[in-house]
Amino acid sequence: MDIPESQWTEDEFCAVGTETDRIPSYKSSASSGVKAGISSGSSVHELLECPVCTNSMFPPIHQCPNGHTLCSSCKQRVHNHCPTCRQELGNIRCLALEKVAESLELPCKYQHLGCSEIHPYYSKLKHEQLCRFRPYNCPYAGSECLVTGDIPMLVAHLKNDHKVDMHDGCTFNHRYVKPNPHEVENATWMLTVFSCYGHYFCLHFEAFLLGMAPVYMAFLRFLGEDSEARNFSYSLEVGGNGRKLIWQGVPRSIRDNHRKVRDSYDGLIIHRNMALFFSGGDRQELKLRVTGRIWKEQ
């Protein structure tokens, strides 16, 4: 079936299992509760909140001669003067408050997102940095989007705010098009999101310099944890003029941002000369067809 050529605009359309032209765009607090009978509104818990940054304080906790406390990071920010009474802070530590903190056990701050774990005060922060219920960053690669949320929220955000292509199915066949490919070294094509096996996957396609060599790269990311991503595999294939390249790998979790995945070269990489050879014609326009599928490992 003949496929109409795509114009270099942002209003694209693609369908799973059908060939599609793809067009590039250019890159331009404290926890709510505690254990052992101490309520979230207790004075002890409030005392462990830094009055400057409002974050939980960890040793060394500093205090002024009048007993006002603050965290070690903010001690430098206030130029060694108490933000409450303006007394010089010196190097007095509030050892009693540090000791009290050792006796506390607090729920994870992502309790409202489903985490039921409770940790000692001083190990709670480490847990929260790796908690599987912590919000995900938006996986959109065309701009530095600061939106975070759970997977359903991010899927709706990608669809409504970034206007990405959303499709059901585990196979794809896209053609990425770019006039004058010699003029641009860095470009990002519109993200495509697939609903497959009850999960979501996003397909990336980018142009960048690998050392001094211009290349194109396609890779897949999984909207979820790395432990879940390892249950799936995917393949990508590109070719033309009787030749083809095939890549097979495991989708990377969106916990790894797209730049980290790209810079690890964990995907299908096509050097520009090879891409233009696959494109055919006079090598003055990129017309690269990428097909692929996703499957679940047994």
Image (cartoon, rainbow, N blue to C red):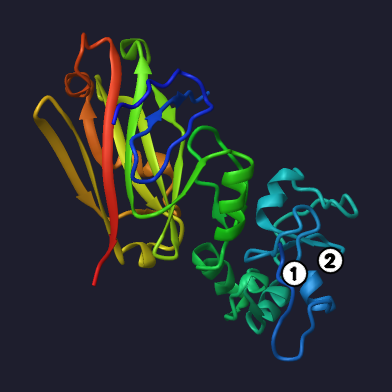
Alpha carbons under labels 1 and 2: distance apart: 13 Å
Q: Is residue 111 left or right of residue 261?
A: right
Neighbor class of circle 1 (other Cα within 10 Å; few <14, some 14-19, many 20+) is: many
Relative to 178, say whether 149 is above or below. below
In front here: 127 or 53? 127
Instruction: List the single residue furthest toward the right.
Output: 85
Tell me the crowding category of disc 2: few under 14, some 14 to 19, or many 20 or more residues within 10 angstroms, Cα based: some
Picture coordinates of residue 189 (x, y %)?
43, 30
Q: Position of residue 19 (x, y in %)?
A: 33, 35
**Figure quadrant of the N terminus:** top left
Q: Position of residue 241 (x, y in %)?
A: 12, 24
Q: Residue at x 32, y 14 (%)?
A: 181
| Label 1 SS | loop
Label 1 is placed on what type of residue? Leu
Q: Quadrant of residue 54?
A: bottom right
> Looking at the rendered structure, which numbered label has been put on residue 219?
none
Residue 159: x %, y % from top left: 58, 45
| Comes first in the chain, label 1 or label 2 | 1
According to the image, label 1 marks what residue?
48
Location of mark 2 (residue): 67
Query: Of helix, strand and loop, which one carries label 2?
Result: loop
The vertical placement of 275 against 68, above or below, is above
Where residue 277 sits, quadrant-wise, is top left
156 or 141: which is nearer to us? 156
Q: Quick check: marks 1 and 2 in contact, CB under 8 Å?
A: no
Residue at image location 28% in from the left, 51% down from the top: 293
Name the front one of labels 1 and 2: 1
Disc 2 residue type (three-letter) = Gly
- Quadrant containing the C terminus in the rendered view: bottom left
